[in-house]
Amino acid sequence: MSYAQAIDGLSFEFEILGTSPETLEKGPEDGVYVYGLYLEGARFDRRTWKLQDSEPGKMYDLLPAIHFKPAVGHKQAPATYACPVYKTAVRKGVLSTTGLSTNFVVPVELPTDKPEQKWILAGVAALCNLTD
Amino acid sequence: MAVMSSELDAMYSALLTNRVPGLWERVSFASLKSLASWAADFVNRVAFMRSWLRQGQPAAFALPVFFFPQVRYPYPPNFISILTCLCPVGIHDGVVADLCAKTPRGKIANRSILHMQHKYNGLLHPCHMPRLLMDFRLSSRF
């Protein structure tokens, strides 16, 4: 579908989906459904649908499928944490020509009822690959 | 007489200790996994791409499957422009057949791949499939 929008004005809005990726039958009208991200340093509470502290002994938590929706001039939604997505658990990479780390993918906004600083201090991030 | 090069020797010891050999890592997706998990992950990635090829666009995408191969290609620079939109290290024959069947402008895809295989003698290395497939989707629109 074409909207004739300038590509540099586009960013993503995020919606956490309640269904598992296998049960999704059709893609969204705009954007994509994405899955396979692991949360490190926190967990995503399936009851309150918000970020919570990790449970004892559980290092990682698989995030539900997320709808990446393209949006024009999107600002970070209130009561969310802009969670960085990294490819591997080292998190560091080398600076690429885009000015971002080669290990960094995209920030994903996760709903939270706690101040964002809490999660920043805890270094909460989503990972594409676990080290196992 | 040197029986094994140092690279081959390093690969051998990596295989023994369940690490991904450096030679493979250079063209691989970013990963900290041990060799066994890496191989399982790799198979999963290929399976995702294969189901995309055979059954059409999936409803949801596994984000970790996509990666940009940030490697220095050990190939002549004048060839890189063609190769970066194809695949720098050759691909599996079965996949080539799939691609040709699915690409609307199959003839062009066919020819480029043949050219590539001729140039590199069909060297087997499916590491760059995701990138390859994405580019094929792009090129099929023009």
Image (spheres, coloured by chain):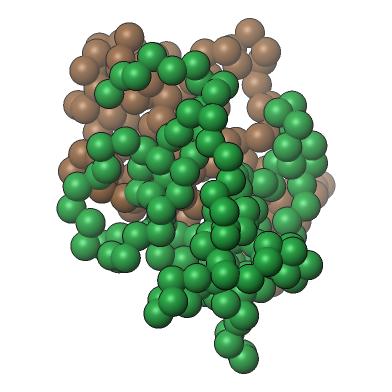
The residue at 74%/26% (across/down) is A97
Residue A89 visible to the viewer: no
Residue A74 at x, y percent in the picture? 53, 36
Left or right of residue B28, residue B64 in this image: left
Residue B85 visible to the viewer: yes
Q: Looking at the rendering, in which quadrant would you find the N terminus of chain A?
A: top left
**Chain identifier for the brown-coloured part of the image:** B
Give above or below for A122 relative to A107.
below
The residue at 49%/16% (across/down) is A6
Give above or below for A50 relative to A95.
below
**Chain identifier for the green-coloured part of the image:** A
Q: Looking at the rendering, in which quadrant would you find the C terminus of chain A?
A: bottom right
Figure quadrant of residue B9: bottom right
Between B123 and A80, the one nearer to me in the picture: A80
The residue at 66%/27% (across/down) is B73
Residue B96 at x, y percent in the picture? 32, 30
The number of numbered discs placed on residues in the rendered structure image is: 0
Give above or below for B128 relative to B37.
above
Residue A29 at x, y percent in the picture? 25, 37
Between A78 and B114, the one nearer to me in the picture: A78
The residue at 24%/33% (across/down) is B98
Residue at the far front in the pictured view = A78
Residue B126 at x, y percent in the picture? 46, 41
Residue at the far bottom in the pictured view = A56
Left or right of residue A91, residue B97 in this image: left
Between B129 and B67, the one nearer to me in the picture: B67
